[in-house]
Amino acid sequence: MLIGGHVSPAGGLVNAFHRGVERDCDAIQIFNQSPRAWRLQTYREDDLAEFRSLLAEGPVRAIVLHAVYLINPASKDDVIRKKSLDALAHALRMGDAMGAHGVVVHPGSQVGEPLEESIDRVGDAIRYVLSESERCPLLLENTAGAGGTIGRSFEELARLVELGGGDERLGLCLDSCHLFAMGFGVRTADELSETIERCEEIVGVDRLRCIHVNDSKAAFGSKRDRHAPLGEGELGRQGCAAFFSEPRFEGLPTIFEGPGLEGRGAALADIKVARELREEGLAARGLAKGGRGGAKRGSARRGTAKRGSAQRGSARSGQRSRKGATKRGSS
Ligand SMILES: [Zn+2]
Ligand SMILES: [Zn+2]
């Protein structure tokens, strides 16, 4: 499991990498451009080159890009639609240039339009942006279900993958807070396991590529997207620990987005909590391998350089082999 946090890319990608290192992250997520503005941002060639070589060295070994919030590929409005497609295609091309694990996007909102037509428009948009970029996976994030947000159920996500052409670059990013707010059982290891089984049945086994672990301020089934610091919300330590120890998530970037304990973005203290929760979760499942060093932090780090590059290789091709994930999970 590549535990990490959302960090700022202010000053360039190399700075984002170092922010990840300072926070003890194995993976980082960034907004590839200002999340509430349309202006496309391109990174300098030298920044990209240095970033890629840092990523190959570690300790941060994967980057996930989060697309702009304004994007709505379901929109009927020509102007919004064009801007959305341009921004998303651009994010994927930046992902190509960085060797990113994927671009996470909220699939869109109906804004009063019929669901089926809206979903069709998102499917068209997905095919277009994939055709405008090379390799970077596009990861559809499940939503908390507020208003007309699309992607609230596994059935909707499966439909989007299908209409998007079923390309192997298409995957999912599941957010713990959104699942909980939408009324999915995720508060214990058993509940979560059942939910993820359903996800794999409906959307497919190899589609799960990234996890957001955020606690929830809002109640179960409230359809409200309000993040809480890890262990301090309605999911609590047990719920968050279940996410950090779910065997199907091994090998995946598992990102805390914030706000954290200090009321701002993911900080070192939050990632420390994430790692404690992983230990708690593994212990509760009887998977703690402290004696053999397996689940222990220090030993997990040793000898990871090789696996790190193999992982990026597979992330690039948009595939994740079960075998590889299991192997990584055993360390
Ligand atoms: Zn999220
Ligand atoms: Zn959220």
Image: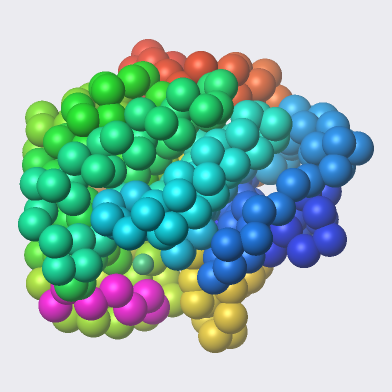
Residue at 65% across, 60% down = 39
How many discs mark residues in the rendered view?
0
Query: In the image, is residue 165 above or below residue 87?
Result: above
Q: Looking at the picture, how far across and down is residue 260, in whole percent?
A: 52, 76
Q: Looking at the picture, how far across and down is residue 231, in whole percent?
A: 37, 73
Residue at 34% across, 44% down = 140
Q: Where is residue 220, by image quadrant? A: bottom left
Query: In the image, is residue 130 above or below residue 235?
Result: above
Residue at 51% across, 17% down = 317
Query: In the figure, is residue 171 to the left or right of 52?
Result: left
Q: Residue furthest right?
A: 46
Q: Where is residue 304, by image quadrant? A: top right
Q: Looking at the picture, how far across and down is residue 308, in whole percent?
A: 63, 26
Magenta residue span: 222-228
Coloring basis for residues = rainbow
Q: Look at the magenta stretch and give its main secondary structure.
A: loop
Query: In the figure, is residue 324 to the left or right of 29?
Result: left
Res 169 visible: yes
Q: Where is residue 124, by image quadrant? A: top left
Query: In the image, is residue 224 above or below residue 274?
Result: below
Residue at 21% across, 55% down = 150
Q: Residue furthest front?
A: 78
Res 289 visible: no
